[in-house]
Amino acid sequence: MGKRIIVTGGSGFLGTHLLRALVAEGYEVKNIDLRQSKEFDTVVADVQDKERMLVEITDAEAVFHLASLIEAGESVKEPQKFIDYNIDGTLSVLDAMKANGISTFLFSSSAAVYGEPIRVPIQEDDRTMPINPYGMTKLAMEALLSSYVQAHGFTGVALRYFNLYGPEEHHQPETHAIPRFIKQIYEGQEVTIWGNGQHQRDYIHISDIVDAHLKALKYAEVHPAGYHYFNLSTEKPSSVLDIVAAVESAMGKKAQVKHYPERPGDPLLLYADASKAHVELGWSAHVSLQNGVKEVVEYFVRYWEENGQNGN
């Protein structure tokens, strides 16, 4: 077998796609998650369980740490939950790695670490001032990792990106724009848009993000004992109305759009500069919004029809 890689949170949307890609590359994988994966053997455990992590995080070349709570809105209501899971969970993974001689840690950070940007496109060394507890925990996770690089000779890679999307994305309830719009249009419900729909965000396809994770793993091997952080961006932001139009086009069906008042603290333009990732990782995003949304629409329509949901 090839080298062994541990993935925390591998039963989720990104984790499933990443595990498949690692296996395809010849790696042996171990998944640690609160939920059993449908495809991969899973150690069902909580990353906050320090004793259990000491037992499970062993005999591996590297750890991809994906286990984290991700809903920014929920973090505002329950900050302590996010601090416990995201920060303490990360600490117990890092400590288990230190105890067991694993020193390469790669994780999904977030462009939420920047908060309200001082300029767009955002560059990696722009000000980091999160505006919700979720973004704060991601920044704290980066700082923890950076401190382990300094104190213990770890190799750390943080990947910062905004709106990840792709097939097989299921959240309960669904809060992410693309799957939500697809469902609303499919069911003939009204599509809720805050403000005039001109807010622009960076939507990045799962296959491009997985590719960046694989490239980051190779990069970490060549650049050990350092802390590295990269923006991952298509560098082509799309407005909410662009997303709706792409779904309408893929589905051949008009959306019933309903506009609501703008939400406070919702920047008009939010996307990042990915030139550091282009140069150092040899990575760039390839999937266009039109092709990506078409693939996701086809996936969901097939999924609903096979499961007899008829969009309900």
Image (cartoon, rainbow, N blue to C red):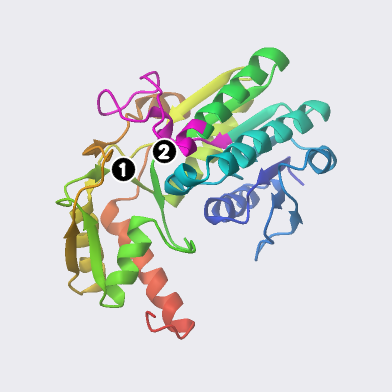
Q: Residue at x 47, y 60 (%)?
A: 169
Residue 89 picture location, percent across and down? 67, 38
Q: Residue at x 50, y 28 (%)?
A: 139
Q: Is residue 201 left or right of residue 28?
A: left
* Up/down of 8 relative to 173, above or below: above
The C terminus lies in quadrant: bottom left
Q: Residue at x 30, y 70 (%)?
A: 184
Residue 125 picture location, percent across and down? 39, 18
Q: Which mark is residue 149?
A: none
Residue 88 picture location, percent across and down? 67, 35
Q: Residue at x 70, y 16 (%)?
A: 153
**CA separation in Å, label 1 and label 2:** 8 Å
Residue 71 picture location, percent across and down? 47, 48
N-terminal of the two: label 1 or label 2? 2
Question: Outermost residue toward the top?
Answer: 150
Is residue 295 among the parts visible in the rendering?
Answer: no
Q: Look at mark 2 in the image and give the residue it sits on.
A: 161
Residues 252 and 193: in front is 193
Magenta stretch holds residue 238: no
Q: Is residue 270 left or right of residue 115?
A: left
Residue extent of the magenta highlight: 107-136
Q: Which mark is residue 202?
A: 1
**Residue at disc 1, secondary structure:** loop
Residues 254 and 195: in front is 195
Residue type beneath disc 1: Asp
Residue type beneath disc 2: Tyr
